[in-house]
């Protein structure tokens, strides 16, 4: 497997981090995951735009950030992978390496870019929508969830808890300053949607959730299908009474057939979910 690391393409076994890499010591960096289907990247511009915004959010300049797209394409080509999920990571280093462990950023930071292309199953347009159960956990993450940061410990703990309880996703719930009660924000690695009173709802992309690329694609698909859509947070009670719910990310759209043991929509993927999942597949395949 060829990866991109330390300024070049190399065999994975030959790529190493310096011991004081800030991505490891401080989770000081950001990332993206881009899907390739039949050799084509999906929503590349949106990923580059979000990477730029995440880098600005942590104050790490990468003036040539557009190069991420061509590095990624080249990595996929070198690995001969028509279907792939490409992980991009940008951490804060400095000329000559990250230097001694210090809470203070290096004076002249430089982005250290790593990319890994993982093979993926070819997308099957005839496959049924993925479905699974969800649990709800407290959203203990920081207040800047619009940044796709490497600080994934809360997400990883939440997903592990979901798996332990036989669920596919953990939905985060939090009390936001200035808002009454608690709301569902998003999943541990997904955006969450629910159909409530006939309206498709998802949390606004206001920094309490990641502005998911898939979220934007599905919102656009829903609006062009003239569905009633509202970017407004929902509560646990609203979710448990919803007629449909789903979670989405670059890897897939997953119908949530139960939440905390309460069946949603009779325990099956609903009509809106199936329509949007199909629209997503068409968009990905450029059909
Ligand atoms: N929300 C969180 C917290 C995520 O980690 C992710 C993806 O990793 C998403 C939402 C979905 O984003 P996208 O659709 O861009 O993959």
Image: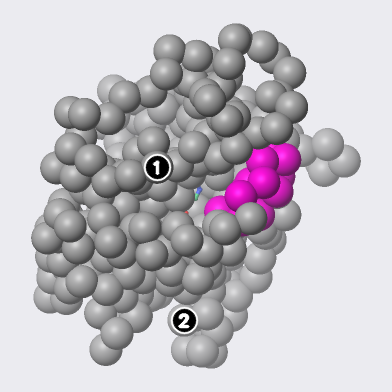
Magenta residue check for 15 = no
**Image quarter (top left, top right, bottom left or bottom right) of the C terminus:** bottom left
Mark 2 closeness class: few <14, some 14–19, many ≥20 residues within 10 Å: some
The percent coordinates of residue 32 (x first, y second) are 45, 50
Query: What residue is drawn where x is 74% and y is 27%?
Result: 107
Q: Is residue 238 visible?
A: no
Query: What residue is drawn where x is 36% and y is 58%?
Result: 71
**Direction front: furthest residue:** 96
Magenta-drawn segment = 51-62
Q: Is residue 122 left or right of residue 87?
A: left
Q: Main secondary structure of the magenta part?
A: helix
- Choose the circle earlier in sequence order: 2 or 1: 1
Q: Is residue 103 left or right of residue 226?
A: right
- Mark 2 sits near ligand 1, with its Cβ under 8 Å away: no
Q: Which is more foreground, mark 2 or mark 1?
A: 1
Residue 67 vs residue 126, the one in the foreground: 67
Above or below for 254 versus 11: below
The percent coordinates of residue 163 (x first, y second) are 29, 29
Q: Which residue is mark 1?
A: 7
Query: What residue is drawn where x is 66% and y is 11%?
Result: 102
The percent coordinates of residue 31 (x first, y second) are 48, 44
Residue 141 vs residue 171, the one in the foreground: 141
Mark 1 closeness class: few <14, some 14–19, many ≥20 residues within 10 Å: few
Q: Which residue is mark 2?
A: 221
**Direction top: furthest residue:** 101
Residue 246 vs residue 7, the one in the foreground: 7
Measured Cα–Cα span from mark 2 to mark 1? 38 Å
Above or below for 275 versus 237: below
Residue 90 vs residue 273, the one in the foreground: 90
Above or below for 71 versus 236: below
Q: Tag 1, which secondary structure?
A: loop
């Amino acid at each position: 497997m060829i990866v991109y690391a330390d300024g070049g393409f190399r065999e994975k076994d030959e790529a190493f981090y310096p011991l004081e890499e800030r991505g490891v010591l401080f989770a000081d960096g950001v990332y993206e995951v881009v899907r390739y289907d039949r050799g084509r990247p999906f929503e590349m511009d949106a990923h580059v735009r979000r990477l730029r915004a995440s880098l600005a959010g942590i104050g790490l300049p990468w003036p040539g950030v557009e190069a991420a797209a061509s590095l990624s394409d080249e990595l996929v080509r070198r690995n001969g992978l028509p279907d792939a999920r490409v992980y991009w990571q940008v951490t804060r280093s400095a000329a000559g390496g990250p230097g001694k462990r210090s809470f203070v950023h290096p004076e002249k930071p430089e982005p250290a870019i790593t990319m890994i292309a993982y093979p993926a199953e070819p997308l099957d347009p005839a496959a049924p929508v993925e479905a699974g159960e969800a649990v709800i956990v407290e959203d203990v993450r920081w207040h800047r969830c619009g940044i796709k940061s490497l600080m994934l410990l809360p997400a990883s703990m939440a997903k592990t808890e979901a798996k332990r309880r036989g669920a596919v996703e953990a939905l985060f719930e939090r009390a936001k300053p200035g808002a009454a009660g608690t709301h569902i924000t998003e999943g541990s690695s997904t955006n969450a949607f629910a159909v409530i009173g006939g309206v498709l709802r998802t949390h606004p992309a206001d920094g309490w959730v990641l502005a998911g690329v898939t979220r934007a694609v599905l919102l656009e698909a829903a609006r062009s299908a003239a569905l009633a859509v509202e970017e407004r947070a929902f509560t646990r009670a609203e979710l448990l009474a919803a007629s449909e719910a789903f979670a989405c990310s670059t890897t897939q759209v997953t119908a949530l057939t139960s939440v905390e043991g309460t069946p949603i929509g009779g325990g099956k993927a609903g009509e809106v979910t199936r329509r949007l999942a199909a629209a997503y597949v068409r968009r990905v395949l450029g059909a």
